[in-house]
Amino acid sequence: MQLDDDDLPFPAGNVPAGFRSREITLAPGTTLSYDESEWQDSLVVVERGTLELLGTDGSRTRFGRSGILWLTGLALRALHNPGSQTAVLRAVSRRPDPRHGAPGRPTDDIESAKGEDGGLNG
């Protein structure tokens, strides 16, 4: 089955308001050291090529085009492109909340739900 770019979850990097998108490219044969902080709060889609996750235990897991990954909390040492074409990843995450400097939580704003006594309204 051939996928068109429009079949990907975020075609052309278009994401809803309140989110941001990063494109990561890995040339054929390239290995990128894993740094969990780079992937925090990101949903990652393989838009083109092949991505291989290299585990700290020596395991290897491959994902092709349209693979969707969550790269936090994993025992990884690196991301690798074993293919012959450039791998393109799209990392989508929530935009930081300017009030707190942390990713926004669109449906869970505790501060606005607090009453004058500091307790939750309701």
Image (spheres, rainbow, N blue to C red):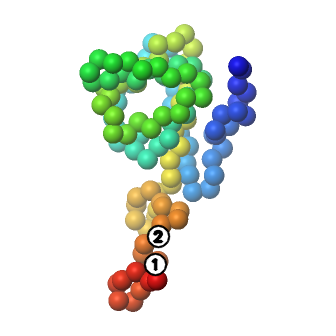
For mark 2, does the 10 Å Cα neighbourhood hold few (<14), some (14 to 19), or many (20 or more) residues? few
Q: Which residue: 40% across, 23% down?
A: 53
Q: Mark 2: which amino acid?
A: Asp
Residue 74 x, y percent position in the rendering: 33, 34
On-image quarter of the N terminus: top right
Q: Answer whether labels 2 and 1 touch (C-beta < 8 Å).
A: yes
Task: Tell whether 45 sits left or right of 79.
Answer: right
In this rendering, the answer to whether 3 lies above or below 96 is above
Residue 5 x, y percent position in the rendering: 70, 30
Residue 116 x, y percent position in the rendering: 39, 89
Q: Mark 1: which amino acid?
A: Ala
Q: CA distance from mark 2 to mark 1?
A: 7 Å
Q: Which residue is mark 2?
A: 109
In this rendering, the answer to whether 99 lies above or below 38 is below
Q: Which residue: 50% across, 52% down?
A: 94
Q: Nearer the viewer, residue 96 or 52?
A: 52
Q: Which residue is mark 1?
A: 113
Q: Nearer the viewer, residue 15 or 68?
A: 68
Q: Which residue: 47% across, 13% down?
A: 82
For numbered disc 2, what is the local secondary structure? loop
In this rendering, the answer to whether 12 lies above or below 53 is below
